[in-house]
Amino acid sequence: MGYVAVKGGAAAIENAEKFSLARRAGGASALLKPEQIREQLHLAVDRVMGEGSLYAPDLAALAFKQAAGDTFEAAFILRSYRTTLPRLGYSEPIATSGMRVIRRISAAFKEIPGGQILGPTPDYTLRLLDFELQDESASRTRQRIRQLLQEVQLLDPLPERFPKVVEMLRREGLLVRHRHGSGDGDGLVDITRQALSFPAARSAQLQTLARGETGGLLALAYSNMRGYGSVHPVIGELRVGFLPVSYKNPGSGSVECIGEIQVTEAEVISRIAGAEGPAVFSLGYGLCFGHNETKAIAMAVLDRAMACEEPVAPSEDQEFVLTHVDGIESMGFCNHYKLPHYVTFQSELDRLRNIQIGQRPPEDTPS
Amino acid sequence: MKPSMPSKAIPPPADWRDSGPPARGHYSYAFLDEGAKREIRRKMLKAVAIPGCQVPFGSREMPIARGWGTGGLQLTLALIGPDDVLKVIDQGSDDSVNAVNIKKFVSRVTGVAVTTDTRAASLIQTRHRVPEEPLQPHQLLIFQVPIPEPLRLVEPSERETRRMHAEADYSRMWLYLYEDIVKFNEITVGARYPVLVNRRHLMDPSPIPRWDVAKLNQGQALCLFCAGREKRIYAVPPHTEVEPLSFDDFAFRAEGFGGRRCGRCGSTATYLDEVIDDAGGGRSYSCSDTAYCEKIRRRGGARGADGPGEGPA
């Protein structure tokens, strides 16, 4: 008998869990501390926070450790923790023009007011395996960081705000005006409190994408870029930086800053649109927790793709995109096929056997 | 809200990781926050008011994966009180790994008593089966649902299926069944057989075998269905008509077992699991409802054509 109907399922589950523990921590190396993950594997932590839909670097690092590096699993753990937290209120809207940037680039213009700021990125680094990291010297690494901070000219003080590239285009009338999605008008939809319905309001679209799984968003956006679609994006501006989060105290009515979040924001300029009125460029918008440029760009492309009035490609079909990008849902459903299905399979067997009996030539049928 | 633990409840099972305070200490009673429970209960009331109609709700993430019973679990957690007695089955079995896991979790966050006896349970969460013993009016049956939309078979778009339900336009489903009969002289839908509830809404009864469909019709207990991933709740209230789609000249047919009986208890009127015993392909059969099977065995086995009394004809 298999693992299903046998008594003692509880003991088997417990042992399976212990074996996972042994796989994660049974080696000879020192056990990872969550703070090491938070600092040194920060991009993984950012990804987990974004897909887990909870801005909590310490908890995301812990989840990543617990999941032994599986980002799907770590985001899932963080989401199920999020479920237990009461919704106390909503933050004030945040204007991203006030971002304290660590990186800011535009592909649309050679020079932009405020300057192109590369910040931390591996974009132009040769992806050669760095064998020095095998036995990294802490003192030597620190020395190199010190040297960097001495030699490089840092913007100090940082400007209060960098002008947004797309705003400059907008002022010149080259870009669509701010648009609202179809559906719910101005009212913000919160998809964690109500099920998505179609056509989805733009707020619901953006929220779904922001919580989406990076690989899932990328695959759909890439299909559009390659030819199943027609966004043809130009990155108007990509920013990585920190934003203050303010909350209006319901008691006193005063607005207080309760912390800051790191985000990546992408604004992609797309082909000329406008069936009515003057021809203008259209825009796609992406924003996600942490430093995750692939996700922000893919999100912006999908945002623009879904604005198509007559969807042809899958990435332009809002229902297709929004119902398939959530990693927690897709991963869970994919894995649920491991659960026993013998009752339903028996039902299918019954149908097939009956069909085969009916299909047999008459002489085979026992009289 | 943390109701006091009743004396009859058995404490949650100890966990091998627990070294300090019990796990419940970090979480509220029944895991979900009270706002979530309230919303889920309201949506259940709406579902009961419109039998078979799918009601969208703000499905929460659970500590078990999507597709593993997060819908059923949310209903259970929103309904369960300290005096409830819980039974959880998967494929009819109380000891299936996923059923054990869910039962253990609910027990840990509520401290309620658990049982395998269908009659002793006030709340039964199930995946893919309706228990063989007829349910009583005070009992609740909660189904885990993977795909709540019966029309998904013929139409992928949610927007379109919502319209079809609104207009009671089920022609494509009828056509699908008709084409099956033309092609195979049989309907190919095995489990998850579409049913018409209260003569109005086409409903997916969850992947129960066709054997169990008759048990939903004019039942004594309230049946609640929930798909966590697809964020839908629906219900079949007691004494409600549930009719599988069928044609005048091609009747609905439940699974048959060719007169075979359970190898353990001898029942001939229960849904059987077919087990491959050896590499040569030898088969044995036993009740899918393991708790019922055990009960009959303790009574000394079934005699003649014994069954739970309400098996399909």
Image (spheres, helix red, strand yellow):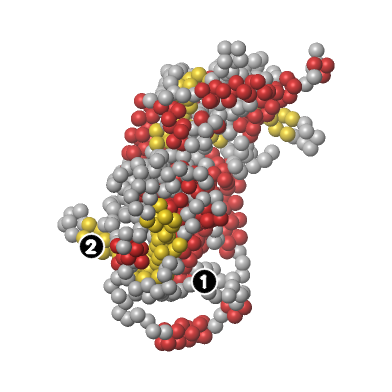
Instruction: Please give the name of the residue rendered at 32% of the width and 71% of the height, measured from the top-left corner.
Output: A162
Amino acid beneath label 1: Asp
Between A182 and B237, the one nearer to me in the picture = A182
Task: Provide the residue designation for mark 2.
Answer: A256
Q: Residue B52, how many percent across, how many down?
A: 43, 26
Disc 2 vs disc 1: which is toward the camera? Answer: 1
Q: Quadrant of the C terminus of chain A?
A: top right
Residue B164 occupies quadrant? top left
Instruction: Name the secondary structure under disc 1.
Output: loop
Amino acid beneath label 2: Glu
Between B157 and A243, the one nearer to me in the picture = B157
Whichever of labels 2 and 1 marks the residue nearer the N terminus, that label is 1
Instruction: Please give the name of the residue rendered at 34% of the width and 53% of the height, measured from the top-left corner.
Output: A278
Q: Residue A320, how many percent across, how many down?
A: 49, 44
Instruction: Name the secondary structure under disc 2.
Output: strand
Instruction: Please give the name of the residue rendered at 58% of the width and 78% of the height, measured from the top-left corner.
Output: A133
Between B111 and A343, the one nearer to me in the picture = A343
**Is the residue at mark 2 from the same chain as the one at mark 1?**
yes
Task: Provide the residue designation for mark 1.
Answer: A123
Q: Residue A345, how many percent across, how many down?
A: 64, 32
Q: Disc 2: which chain? A: A
Q: Is residue A217 visible?
A: no
Q: Residue B56, how many percent across, how many down?
A: 40, 36
